[in-house]
Image (spheres, rainbow, N blue to C red):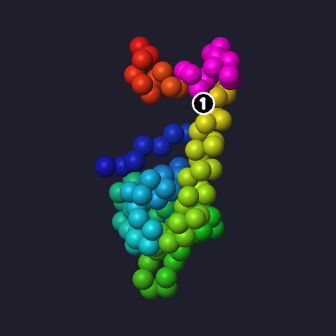
């Protein structure tokens, strides 16, 4: 089944981010071989050139690497994976804080709001 994409950003970046999320969430393990460009393009429902561009983006970030005639693999650099994971978390937290302040919460109250939510005390 084809993946779902939005029109807010280029498809290749959405694909790269999807694969990156699978890597940092350990769905795809360090050192694991990735499917071929053709196979993954077919799964995602995109042109192989789009998938190739996503892989090039991931290679430039160091998240994946190519071994000639063997395919592409996830980096084994666990420090890099952790760094990317923390960077994504920081981005998500900043987005959350911005949205919460827009709807009227004071930044100083957010930890209390989160604490109540995590404990299941919010309805």
In the image, 41 versus 114, the foreground residue is 114
Residue furthest to the left: 1
Q: Residue at x 59, y 39 (%)?
A: 92
Q: Quadrant of residue 122?
A: top left
In the image, 20 versus 105, the foreground residue is 105
Q: Residue at x 53, y 66 (%)?
A: 78
| Residue 123 percent location from the top left of the image | 41, 14
Mark 1, residue position: 96
Q: Does residue 116 lie above or below 69 as drawn?
A: above
Q: Residue at x 44, y 73 (%)?
A: 31
Q: Is residue 92 left or right of residue 122?
A: right
| Residue 112 percent location from the top left of the image | 56, 22
Examine the rendering and report whether any part of residue 50 can be seen. no
Examine the rendering and report whether any part of residue 5 can be seen. yes
Q: Quadrant of residue 54?
A: bottom right
The tally of labels here is 1
In the image, 122 versus 59, the foreground residue is 122
**Magenta stretch, overall SS:** helix
Q: Does residue 60 lie above or below 100 as drawn?
A: below
Mark 1 Cα within 10 Å, few/some/many (few <14, many 20+)? Answer: few
Q: Is residue 118 left or right of residue 17?
A: left
| Residue 36 percent location from the top left of the image | 40, 70
**Circle 1 — which element?**
helix
Q: Does residue 51 lie above or below 102 as drawn?
A: below
Magenta residues, start to end: 100-113
In the image, 100 versus 54, the foreground residue is 100
| Residue 105 percent location from the top left of the image | 64, 16
Q: Is residue 42 magenta?
A: no
Residue furthest to the bottom: 69
């Amino acid at each position: 089944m084809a993946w779902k994409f939005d029109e807010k950003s280029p498809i290749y970046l959405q694909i790269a981010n999807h694969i990156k999320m699978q890597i940092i969430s350990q769905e795809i393990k360090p050192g694991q071989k990735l499917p071929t460009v053709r196979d993954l393009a077919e799964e995602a429902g995109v042109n192989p050139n789009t998938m190739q561009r996503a892989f090039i983006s991931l290679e430039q970030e160091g998240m994946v690497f190519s071994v000639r005639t063997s395919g592409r693999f996830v980096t084994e650099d666990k420090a890099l994976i952790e760094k990317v994971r923390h960077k994504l978390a920081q981005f998500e937290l900043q987005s959350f804080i911005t949205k919460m302040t827009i709807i009227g919460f004071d930044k100083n109250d957010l930890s209390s709001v989160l604490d109540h939510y995590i404990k299941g005390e919010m309805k």
